[in-house]
Image (cartoon, rainbow, N blue to C red):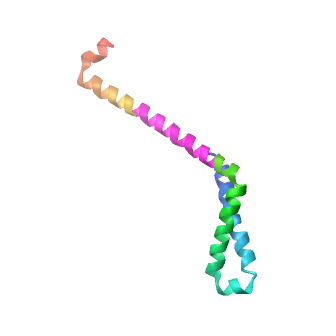
Amino acid sequence: MKARSAILYTVLRLLAFLVPFGILMLFPVFRELYWLAAIFAALIGLSLSLLFLRRPLDDVSSGLAERRERARVSESVKDEQIEDAAADAANPSHRDAS
């Protein structure tokens, strides 16, 4: 996963929440009911991110999937090597037959 894509996505998601929250806090009614402004800002931010942040989300998701696949493959190779070593240690004639 590229750190740049994850940081970019995180910053854009924060902006999608903070900008509407700041705008809503300009209204006197939301100054008293800040929790309502936070709920509306979260809904607006979610909508904006669904509409406009599809590509950064895909970049982050594909990077995470690639990283997970590399870890799974390297782990399975290590497991196979350990199993082969244990089998060779338990049965030395098995190694000569191969």
Judge from the rendering whether residue 80 lies leftward or rightward of residue 91; answer left or right: right
Q: Quadrant of the C terminus?
A: top left
Main SS type for the magenta part?
helix
Q: Residue at x 38, y 29 (%)?
A: 80
- At x 35%, y 31%, the residue is 82
Compared with 42, 57 (above or below) is above
- Residue in the foreground of this view, choosing between 86 and 68: 68
Residue at the (64%, 75%) spot, across then down: 38
Residue 26 highlighted magenta (yes or no): no
Q: Nearer the viewer, residue 85 or 38?
A: 38
Q: Which residues are magenta?
A: 60-78
Percent of width and height locating residue 34: 64, 81
Q: Quadrant of the N terminus?
A: top right
Q: Quadrant of residue 12?
A: bottom right
State left or right for residue 5 relative to residue 66: right
Above or below residue 89? Residue 75 is: below
Label tally: 0
Q: Is residue 68 above or below residue 16?
A: above
20 in relation to 25, above or below: above
Residue 77 at x, y percent in the picture: 43, 31
Q: Where residue 39 appears, x then y in whole percent?
A: 62, 74
Front-most of residues 37 and 94: 37
